[in-house]
Image (tube, rainbow, N blue to C red):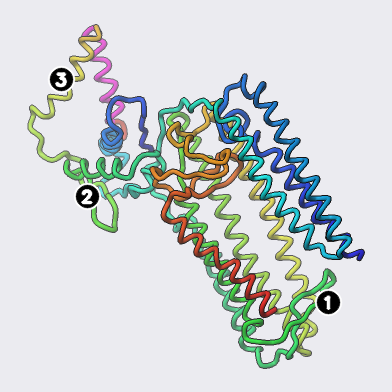
Amino acid sequence: MFITIDEADARPIYAQVAEEIRALIARGELAEGAQLPPVRQLAADLGVNLNTVATAYRELQAEGLLSIRHGAGATVASRTARDKSEEELRKPLRAALTGMVLAGLPRVEIMNLVQSELRALLKGAK
Amino acid sequence: MGDDRTAAIGLLAGEALALAALAWLPAMRGERAFFGVRVDEATYRGEGRRVLRRYWQTLGGVFLLTGALGYYLSVSLGRPFFSGLATLGATAAAFFVYARYARQMRPFAVPAVGTRFASSVRARGLGDYTYPLVEVCVALLTLATFALLGHFYPRLPEMMPTHWNASGAADDWARKTFSSVFFLPALGLYLQVVFVVLKRDLVQAKMTLPATNTEEYLRGKEGFLAANMRLIDLVRALIAALFLAIALLLLSTTIPEFKRFEPYAFAAVLASVGLMLAGAGYYIWRMIAINNGLDELTGDEYVQRAADEGHWRHGGLTYYNPEDPALVVEKLTGVGYTLNLAHRGVWSRLALLSGVPLFVVWALLSL
């Protein structure tokens, strides 16, 4: 179970860290109550600033995915993101699909991509 | 005189070993960390070879001069101490020679290409590498050393042996005082504290993982860490055993009714030293083997961040990076770890290590 970051990626590092943890929780690899590594360890191993990891953890806390208690570290709180409106959920999907359409992918291939990604994501999920 | 010559020759041999290690140091990791900088194949084969050859010549010259001077002084004045001093001086001088040649390689540095890194989601803690049996043994042996010397303190003679020769006969004595008797167990206790702090720091050392082959790489890294922890535990247990054996030797050579235990105590001393050397050899061999396996796994793309590479100084011997939250990092050249000198924790570790000179002074004053 790993968190991977790419320094060449345009997204900020904290967003990458948060996204990786979200994916681990979505796939069920990080179960409810699972302990996350201390901010210091993750920051040192990934070679990033302490604040970068702390920001990622805080973002996930605000989403209700992590619960952070002082001294006890961060644990996985719940597997459902706190009540997002349907429009909020649709927005990133629409952005991703727009990118694929603009890249000239035919409809069938887009469907295949979406399906294989979803399958990979749900594999191992409870 | 003969003894002095033997000691001087022994120290010369030690100096030769140090020279061999220093000669190998710049090229240990090939072009990935040549004199602590990443260079390309052409530089490594061309300019690099020339710099390396000049480094060897200077290094050889320094060692030859200091070695000859030390040997001459120690034999003619009858003080092997000078040979030891020469070795220390040569090693210190070698640091500056190395750093000077490393500066010549700096302009040829090419940055690392790897941009993708990974981290394990499992937290590492000292508890994962603590074995209750070892802890109980260490605690019992250390306490027993204190208890034994405390209990028989009144019966120790006014002059007690502090040094034994190779056949187990005492050849140096000191006056019995509280500080000369309890030097041994106090040193034992201090070493245990140092080693536990070392273990804790090493568990939390930075573990840089590449984003490809991460699973295998992590397994290798964890194997390396486990070998390192076992080595420290082995040394801790054997230090505790060794100090108890020395206390027993002291009692059996000074108190008549314990006389019959003398050969056993002496055998125990030799056995713990022998086991320590053998165990250290085995685990260091394993750690080198694991490291080589990891090198093969990553190939040319050695796991070093471009952002961190610039913070290695003195040709990759020291690391100073205020941006890095890690206190302990893997060495750039060689096997093992080194400290991030920009980290605040360095001061408390130095304070802890300042106990070493204190114990040396204690030994000089009371033994």
Snapshot quadrant of residue A9: top left
In the figure, is residue B172 to the left or right of B210? right
User: What residue is disc 2 on?
Assistant: A67
What type is the residue that disc 3 sits on? Answer: Arg
Q: Residue at x 13, y 29 (%)?
A: A89
Q: Residue at x 64, y 40 (%)?
A: B98
Residue B221 coordinates in the image, percent (x, y): 51, 42
Pointer 3 residue: A94
Main SS of the magenta part reads: helix
Are labels 1 and 2 on one chain?
no
Viewed as shown, does residue B329 lie left or right of A87? right
Q: Can the viewer see residue B347?
A: yes
For mark 2, name the chain. Answer: A
- On screen, residue B271 versus residue B345, left or right, reads right
The stretch of residues the image draws in magenta is: A106-122
> Is residue A20 placed above or below B244 in the rendered structure?
above
**Three-letter code for the amino acid on which mark 1 is drawn:** Ala
Q: Locate residue B256, reporting x and y percent.
A: 78, 90
| Whole-percent x, y for residue A64 in the image | 17, 44
Residue B366 x/y as whole percent? 67, 80
* Picture disc at residue B169: 1
Judged from the image, the secondary structure of the residue bearing numbered disc 1 is: loop
* Image quarter in which the N terminus of chain A is found: top left
Magenta segment: does it hold A118? yes
Vertically, is B65 above or below B77? Answer: above
